[in-house]
């Protein structure tokens, strides 16, 4: 598992900060060339501030990427792949899933020393190169990891909405500055709509359609309806932040309330993955006690808690595990 440089919480989402250091270069020359770079020694990220050097975002762009089979913390895996030079040219500010988020680039949060206000940097996410008013050069990028269970996807989407709202608030942006990858695809194709939501959901044949899982369909009316529903969710959180004056957040996660467990008749489950944490409490924010090995275990209590649809207490007394990643026998 990767170790974050720091951890902080904003708007209910735990962020693991692992910002790619300035001056990082490609080490594997062949991987670099396959990704469109000159070779070993080429800059691994753009290394420039957003919006002509101001470090201020002009929008927040929503993407979807696939959930990884049998992986608990997908954002950590995508971040690890980025650090291992396995994500080609993609560089995004945040990977978000049901467990929280991982930050790979400066976003001007002001929450940690490595990411001061006014430091938001260029990412590679919009497919429009270095166009001065394009998505790469002006927008913050969030990859929401979906396409697992409906419960997982709802939590991941909610975390993405909370994070997007906070970033809009931090950069003084309104809800109409929330856009999709498809918005930038249309801009690159010379298509501009008076209605920003139409531009966000206008499918161009042969071009990337994203955020796929939030759209839910290639049918325009359905995609538009689902995108607007996601924006309503983001706006709810943005209005809360604006109404309360905005809560900057905590540099360390707050201790979660201890969920009330309910005893159940003991039953067997099979753990399907090899990196499922055992937690001291029924919460992803409680202390972990290492991984549980794949196999069959007995559950003696259940509880609701952050980071899982339901948690199960192990008969051994070792702790709690997420029941999203087990099969009941």
Image: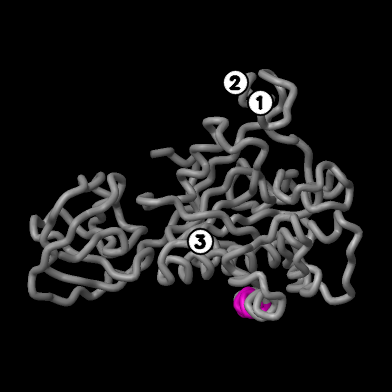
The correct choice, above or below, for 139 with respect to 202 in the image is above
Question: Is the residue under label 2 in contact with that under label 1 (CB below 8 Å)?
Answer: yes
Q: Secondary structure at mark 3?
A: strand
Mark 3 or 1, nearer chain start: 1
Residue 166 at x, y = what percent? 63, 65
The correct choice, above or below, for 46 with respect to 73 in the image is above
Residue picked out by circle 2: 28
Residue picked out by circle 3: 146
Q: Is residue 251 left or right of residue 111?
A: left
Q: Nearer the viewer, residue 251 or 208?
A: 208
Question: Is the residue under label 3 in contact with that under label 2 (CB below 8 Å)?
Answer: no
Q: Nearer the viewer, residue 96 or 145?
A: 145
Residue 51 is inside the magenta segment: no
Residue at 78% of width from left, 38% of height from top? 48
Give the magenta range.
228-236
Residue at 81% of width from left, 42% of height from top? 129
Q: CA distance from mark 1 to mark 2?
A: 6 Å
Q: Secondary structure at mark 1?
A: helix
Q: CA distance from mark 3 to mark 1?
A: 28 Å
Residue 112 at x, y = what percent? 58, 47
């Amino acid at each position: 598992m990767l170790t974050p440089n720091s951890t902080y919480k904003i708007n209910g989402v735990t962020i693991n900060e692992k910002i790619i250091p300035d001056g990082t270069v490609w080490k594997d020359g062949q991987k670099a060339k396959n990704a469109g770079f000159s070779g070993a020694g080429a800059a691994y990220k753009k290394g420039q501030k957003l919006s002509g050097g101001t470090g201020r975002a002009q929008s927040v762009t929503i993407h979807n990427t696939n959930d990884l089979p049998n992986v608990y913390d997908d954002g950590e895996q995508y971040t690890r792949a980025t650090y291992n030079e396995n994500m080609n040219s993609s560089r995004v500010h945040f990977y978000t899933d049901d467990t929280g988020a991982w930050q790979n680039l400066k976003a001007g949060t002001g929450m940690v020393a490595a990411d001061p206000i006014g430091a938001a940097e260029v990412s590679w996410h919009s497919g429009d190169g270095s166009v001065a008013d394009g998505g790469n050069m002006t927008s913050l990028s969030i990859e929401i990891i979906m396409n697992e269970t409906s419960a997982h996807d709802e939590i991941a989407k909610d975390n993405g909405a909370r994070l997007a709202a906070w970033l809009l608030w931090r950069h003084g942006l309104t809800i109409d500055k929330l856009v999709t990858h498809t918005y930038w695809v249309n801009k690159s194709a010379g298509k501009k709509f008076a209605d920003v939501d139409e531009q966000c959901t206008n499918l161009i044949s042969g071009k990337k359609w994203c955020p796929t899982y939030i759209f839910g369909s290639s049918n325009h009316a359905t995609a538009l309806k689902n995108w607007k529903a996601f924006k309503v969710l983001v706006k709810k959180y943005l209005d809360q932040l604006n109404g309360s004056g905005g809560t900057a957040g905590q540099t360390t996660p707050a201790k979660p309330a201890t969920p009330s467990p309910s005893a159940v008749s003991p039953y067997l489950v099979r753990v399907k993955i090899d990196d499922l944490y055992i937690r001291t409490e029924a919460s992803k924010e409680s202390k972990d006690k290492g991984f549980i090995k794949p196999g069959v275990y007995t559950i003696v209590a259940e509880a609701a808690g952050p980071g899982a649809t339901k948690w199960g207490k192990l008969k051994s007394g070792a702790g709690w595990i997420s029941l999203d990643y087990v099969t009941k026998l």
